[in-house]
Amino acid sequence: MSLDRMVLAFAGVMVLLSVVLTVFVHPLFVWFTVFIGANLLQSAFTGFCPAATIFKKLGIRPGTAF
């Protein structure tokens, strides 16, 4: 799996997790979802993604975007 697909999969899992936490634990977990969305938006414009940096250090092969 390339780095690009790994970042997308990780973002999807985090969004689903945050929605589950919002529904079943506490409504303020919605801010976790907002944080994930803001991070995705800023990475689209800046090209910097903290998750991509971590995955690179773990040895995931590079993709096109990161």
Image: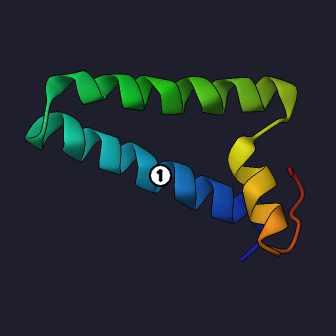
Q: Position of residue 38 (x, y in %)?
A: 57, 23
Q: Is residue 22 left or right of residue 47?
A: left
Q: Is residue 65 left or right of residue 54?
A: right
Colour scheme of the rendered structure: rainbow
Question: How many marks on residues?
Answer: 1
Q: Is residue 10 left or right of residue 43?
A: left
Question: In the rendered image, which quarter contains the N terminus?
Answer: bottom right
Residue on which the image places disc 1: 12
User: Dot 1, crowdedness within 10 Å: few (<14), some or many (≥20)?
Assistant: few
> Does residue 15 sit above or below 41 in this rendering?
below
Q: Position of residue 12 (x, y in %)?
A: 47, 51
The residue lying at 85 percent from left, 74 percent from top is: 61
Q: Position of residue 5 (x, y in %)?
A: 68, 63
- Secondary structure under the numbered disc 1 in the rendered image: helix
Q: Is residue 15 left or right of residue 54?
A: left
Residue occupying the far left of the picture: 24
Which quarter of the picture shows residue 6? Answer: bottom right
The residue lying at 21 percent from left, 46 percent from top is: 20
The residue lying at 81 percent from left, 24 percent from top is: 45
Q: What's under tag 1, amino acid-wise?
A: Gly
Question: Which residue is at the front of the view, 55 or 4?
Answer: 55
> Does residue 64 sit above or below 11 in this rendering?
below
Q: Position of residue 37 (x, y in %)?
A: 52, 28
Question: Which residue is at the front of the view, 58 or 23?
Answer: 58
The residue lying at 75 percent from left, 40 percent from top is: 49
